[in-house]
Amino acid sequence: MLGGLWGIITTIVVGLILGVIGRMLASGDQKIPMWLTIVVGIVAAFIGNWLAGVFGVRDTPGIDWIRHAFQVGAAVVGVIAASAIYAKVKGGHHAST
């Protein structure tokens, strides 16, 4: 049970880190809640791993910088997309006052 709990905690922490990096690198103001930032980061980790596998660079000696670059890129795209979708779902009227 402890291994499963540790895996969940690790996934959330990695998602948080990737989501926050994605928010910092994305242009504009992202008005999304922290829970959505974490979800975007978790999904970005999976997408980045998949892309690294597609390009044959998933497992390299040392630190997998290319895989991490794919993950961060996916997080940036995910944050931008989530911000746009979240604003529409929440009925965000930014310019109408």
Image: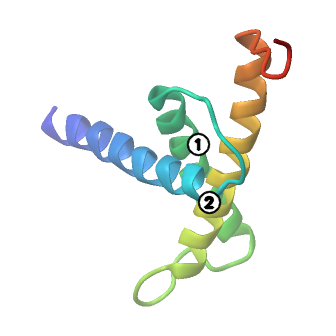
Is 69 located above or below residue 84 in the figure? Answer: below
Query: In this view of the protein, which residue sits in the foreground, 45 or 50?
Result: 45
* Residue 54 x/y as whole percent: 74, 68
Query: Is residue 84 shown left or right of residue 1?
Result: right
Of labels 2 and 1, the one closer to you:
2
Give the tally of numbered discs: 2
Q: How is the image coloured?
A: rainbow
Point 81% across, 12% down: residue: 97
Pick out the residue farthest to the right. 96
Amino acid type at circle 1 is: Val
Q: Secondary structure at mark 2?
A: helix
Point 51% across, 43% down: residue: 42
Is 68 located above or below residue 94 in the figure? Answer: below
The mark found on residue 25 in the picture is 2
Point 16% across, 31% down: residue: 1
Q: Secondary structure at mark 1?
A: helix
Say which quarter of the image contains residue 30: top right
What residue does disc 1 label?
Answer: 43
